[in-house]
Image (cartoon, rainbow, N blue to C red):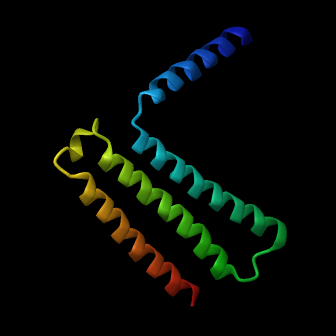
Amino acid sequence: MGTSTAKEAHALIASLRSAYSATPTKLKIIDLYVVYAILTAVVQVVYMAIVGSFPFNAFLSGVLSCTGTAVLAVCLRMQVNKENREFKDLPPERAFADFVLCNLVLHLVIMNFLG
């Protein structure tokens, strides 16, 4: 039973890899940005667990900034994706402008939270 599960897992990974290879380059770049933001948040959490969280506001600001940026990037990816019919009338320039404006507001709030 274990070998059939492993074969199914390999087949699933192969099908996901072949489907992702058809993804446009713009979306792959956004995906890399999301992964980078999440990994940065994870590094901050690990650092806090090892060293301590003396300036707790700074820790929260950093993690919330990374997480918020990742969420906004996922929203950008949804809006830029041509296969998503919900945003078919939205030009990519408008989606990017929304992303930049929301990031600006997010980071103004984060800077205010720092004190």
Q: Position of residue 27 (x, y in %)?
A: 41, 43
Image vertical order of residue 84 relative to residue 71, above or below: above
**108 sits left or right of 87 in the view:** right
**27 sits left or right of 88 in the view:** right
- Residue at the right extreme? 50
Q: Position of residue 5 (x, y in %)?
A: 66, 14
Q: Residue at x 34, y 71 (%)?
A: 101
Image vertical order of residue 25 relative to residue 112, above or below: above
Q: Quadrant of the N terminus?
A: top right
Q: Quadrant of residue 65?
A: bottom right
Q: Residue at x 53, y 62 (%)?
A: 67
Q: How many numbered discs sit on the rendered protein?
A: 0
- Residue at the left extreme? 89
**66 sits left or right of 25 in the view:** right
**37 sits left or right of 83 in the view:** right
Q: Quadrant of the C terminus?
A: bottom right
Q: Quadrant of residue 41?
A: bottom right
Q: Quadrant of residue 83?
A: top left
Image vertical order of residue 31 relative to residue 70, above or below: above
